[in-house]
């Protein structure tokens, strides 16, 4: 009876021992230490990390702006009757953008025009009276005072006619203010009003920019900025699009910001439809030469925000986390931490 009671725990202990032995690899073939054939093939393609003297470029935070940009406002107080564009629309120079109410100004122009006609008729009459007065004066039929009176009346009406015509021109100009047209070829950035609103002089109604006048603006620390020259070629990185564009310095503001001790540098870039005002960019500014550790970019694998390389060491492969900096030349990254000079970096296993 006691033997039967011992069978169950003994069986359980034996099963547990077999499971532990299986997990420890007792029933699998052992591999000698060292590289697998695949790893050995990768080891033959290993890159030896070395320190090189390279031209360093400092990535300066920058933003994209437009050299040619404008804000549309009204020059007269009137109600808006129509706005023909919205944000994102493309416009041409002279295109009608906003129409303001014009009935009052049209009435004023009509009144000024009618006044010109009336004064012109009086000038015609005065001219004829002056002609008759001269003839009568030559015939000694009137006194010189009457001739002078006719001349003065004619001159006064002529001046009144000139004033009336000037009033017509002013009314025409005021009427033209009711049609707000685009001053540039460009694109609408924002619309600040809607039909029915009252436009006051100086109030913003639309903002425009010219996509062909994009440039990069960056505040560069004074030590680097003083080494830059007008027309110098730089590289600009646009993180949002993953692109690197050439830029040419077109303006160096000759005064530093006393707070940050930096100079504003503006560089022109060629037209690209993906560039929009306000986007973030990085201007790569030459910062001299430094001795840096370099690693091929295709030997680095990114997992989220982590960067991993495989390093051959003492006959086996280590997976190592590193931190890289900028691309100092095509295909080569700066190593900030995680690797030492002489390390053998293997291509990624998937390669």
Image (cartoon, rainbow, N blue to C red):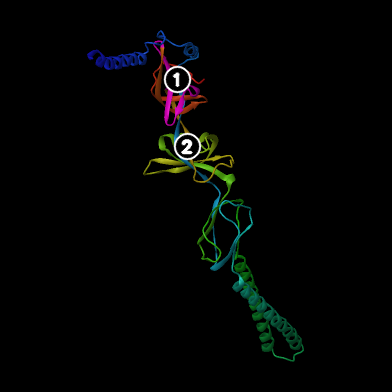
Which residue occupies the extreme top position in the image? 32
SS at badge 2: strand
Q: Residue at x 65, y 83 (%)?
A: 152
Q: Residue at x 59, y 45 (%)?
A: 212
Which residue occupies the extreme front position in the image? 1
Q: Nearer the viewer, residue 120 or 20?
A: 20
| Of the image marks 1 and 2, the number of the one nearer the N terminus | 1
Q: Nearer the viewer, residue 322 or 332?
A: 322
> Which SS does the magenta portion mostly show?
strand
Point out the frontmost of discs 1 and 2: 2
Instruction: Tell me the quadrant of the picture where the N terminus can be found.
Output: top left
Q: Is residue 296 located in the magenta-colored stretch of the structure? A: yes
Report which residue position mark 2 lands on: 282
User: Where 300 sits versus 315, above or below?
Assistant: below
Q: Is 134 on the left or on the right of 9, as rendered?
A: right
Quadrant hosting residue 104: bottom right
SS at badge 1: strand
Q: Nearer the viewer, residue 120 or 9?
A: 9
**Residue 93 visible here:** yes
Q: What label does residue 52 carry, if any?
A: 1
Q: Nearer the viewer, residue 228 or 198?
A: 198
Q: Residues within 10 Å of mark 2 (few under 14, many from 20)?
A: many
The picture places residue 273, in percent across and down from the top left corner, at 59, 42
Q: Is residue 307 located in the magenta-colored stretch of the structure? A: yes
Which residue occupies the extreme left position in the image? 2
The picture places residue 160, in percent across and down from the top left corner, at 64, 78
* Labels 1 and 2 touching (C-beta < 8 A): no
Q: Which residues, given as a range, are shown in magenta?
A: 292-315
Q: What label does residue 42 carry, if any?
A: none
Quadrant hosting residue 224: top left
Q: Residues within 10 Å of mark 1 (few under 14, many from 20)?
A: few
């Amino acid at each position: 009876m006691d033997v039967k009671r011992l069978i169950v725990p003994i069986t359980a202990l034996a099963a547990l021992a077999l499971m532990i032995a299986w997990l420890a690899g007792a029933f699998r073939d052992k591999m000698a230490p060292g590289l697998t054939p695949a790893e050995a093939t990768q080891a033959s393609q290993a890159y030896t990390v070395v320190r090189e003297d390279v031209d360093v470029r400092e990535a300066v935070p920058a933003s994209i702006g437009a050299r040619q940009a404008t804000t549309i406002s009204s020059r007269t107080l009137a109600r808006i009757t129509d706005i023909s564009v919205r944000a994102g629309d493309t416009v041409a120079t002279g295109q009608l953008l906003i129409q303001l109410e014009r009935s009052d100004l049209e009435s004023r122009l009509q009144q000024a025009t009618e006044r010109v006609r009336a004064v012109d008729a009086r000038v015609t009459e005065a001219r004829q009276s002056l002609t008759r007065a001269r003839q009568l004066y030559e015939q000694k039929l009137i006194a010189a005072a009457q001739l002078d009176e006719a001349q003065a009346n004619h001159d006064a009406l002529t001046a009144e006619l000139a004033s009336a015509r000037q009033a017509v021109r002013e009314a025409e100009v005021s009427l033209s203010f009711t049609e707000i047209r685009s001053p540039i070829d460009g694109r609408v950035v924002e619309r600040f009003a809607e039909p029915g609103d009252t436009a006051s002089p100086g109030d913003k109604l639309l903002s425009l920019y010219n996509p062909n006048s994009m440039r990069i603006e960056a505040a560069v620390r004074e030590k680097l900025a003083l080494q830059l020259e007008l027309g110098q070629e730089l590289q600009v990185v646009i993180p949002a699009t993953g692109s690197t564009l050439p830029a040419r310095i077109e303006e160096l503001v000759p005064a530093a910001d006393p707070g940050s001790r930096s100079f504003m540098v503006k560089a022109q870039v060629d037209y690209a439809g993906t560039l929009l005002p306000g986007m973030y960019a990085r201007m790569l500014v030459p910062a001299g030469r430094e001795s840096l550790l370099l690693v091929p970019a295709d030997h680095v694998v990114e997992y989220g925000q982590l960067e991993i390389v495989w390093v051959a060491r003492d006959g086996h492969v280590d997976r190592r986390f590193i931190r890289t900096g900028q691309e100092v030349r095509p295909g080569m990254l700066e190593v900030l931490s995680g690797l030492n000079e002489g390390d053998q970096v293997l291509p990624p296993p998937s390669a």
